[in-house]
Amino acid sequence: MRQLVLLGAGDAHVHVLSTLANKHLPSDVQVTLLAPSSRQLCLGMVPGFVAGHYTLEQCAIALEPWLKKTNVRCLPGSATALHADTRTITLNDGSKIVYDWLSVNTPAVQDRTQIEKAMPGACEFGLFIRPIESFCALWPQVAKLGAERALRVAVIGAEVSGIELAMAIRQRLPQASLTLITGGGAVGADITPAAAQRVVRALKERHITVLCDVVQGIQAGEVLLGCGARLACDVPVIAIGVQAPSWLAGSGFALDKHGFVAVNASQRSTSHPQVFAAHAVRSKADQTLAHNLVASMVGTELAAHRPERNTLSLLSCGDRDAIASWGAYSVQGRWVGWFKERIDRSFVKRYNA
């Protein structure tokens, strides 16, 4: 049997599974999904879960129904190594799987070893946001503690994930002392200037203190800042160091500047034609990936994804308000939050049908 391995259960692979449910693959092809969980969480809804707007179940897409519909084999686990020359994946239990075609759709991770070197004490005292399942499992304990007494919370990292979490925490824990530590840079370095201006105002309106400093260490009850000060902190939320999995670096695949598999317009690896990949965040490229995986197996023409010049970005502000940006333009309001919620809920509903 020839093997198509779907590495990871990101949004793109959820779409691939739904596509396979309506396709007839060659009888000599076995499709295997390698994923650590039996569900996929909608990342766009996680801040709403933290804020208390959703239950975790409302944010989740169950994979089992799709596996039954498609006859896809599922192996629980995650990759620890990839070898392009032998087309072999090593799993976290030490076993190996060989592929004929491979599609990579794994989430970004946090390299705890590197973060610990930069911030001693992070692994002992910090609440990491990745893996997202682990973070979501621990958050209710923090929320319960925060309902009993006013917590001192510091979110370390001021890109989109840290910003959304800070405002979601403010919504859930209104009495908390809440600080956003940027890591030395500006707030919202990964968003447009217009959206970043709105974010700064939103943080101020929600009484979230912003410190443009780095964290040099974490101890019990305090965060050590680069300026030499010590910030009292009960819950340090670590939202920095989100990157591509380290095992991709030694895979032999050509990688992009962010460390993920470099792909062309067909979502195909630029160095290995039997390998495809997609980012964990959903986009129209997911449809291209699904089409081309089937096409590569049946021998038909591949499609090309042509990204739009500008893409719509939606950032949750915690209280059902949201900020939208499109190119140089940005707007904010409850209606934007309603629009974002509708998109996220529709996505989960579509794949839970």
Image: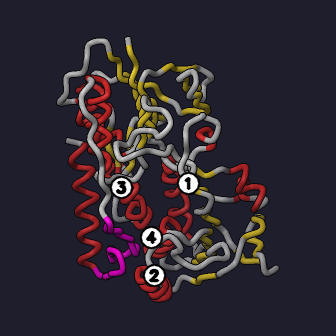
Residue 134 circle label:
none
Count of numbered labels shown in the rendering:
4
Left or right side of 292 for 272 = right
**Mark closer to the chain start, 4 or 2:** 4
Q: Can you identify the residue that label 4 sits on?
A: 168
Mark 1 → mark 2, Cα distance in angstroms: 22 Å
Q: Can you identify the residue that label 1 sits on?
A: 258
| Residue 297 inside the magenta-drawn segment | no
Image quadrant where one finds the C terminus: top left
Q: Nearer the viewer, mark 4 or mark 1?
A: 1
**Mark closer to the chain start, 3 or 1:** 3
In contact (CB < 8 Å): disc 3 and disc 2: no
**Mark closer to the chain start, 1 or 2:** 2
**Disc 4 packing (10 Å; few <14; some 14–19; many ≥20):** many
Residue 55 circle label:
3
Q: Can you identify the residue that label 2 sits on?
A: 193
Tell me where residue 315 sits by quadrant.
bottom left
Mark 4 → mark 2, Cα distance in angstroms: 22 Å
Q: Nearer the viewer, mark 3 or mark 2?
A: 2
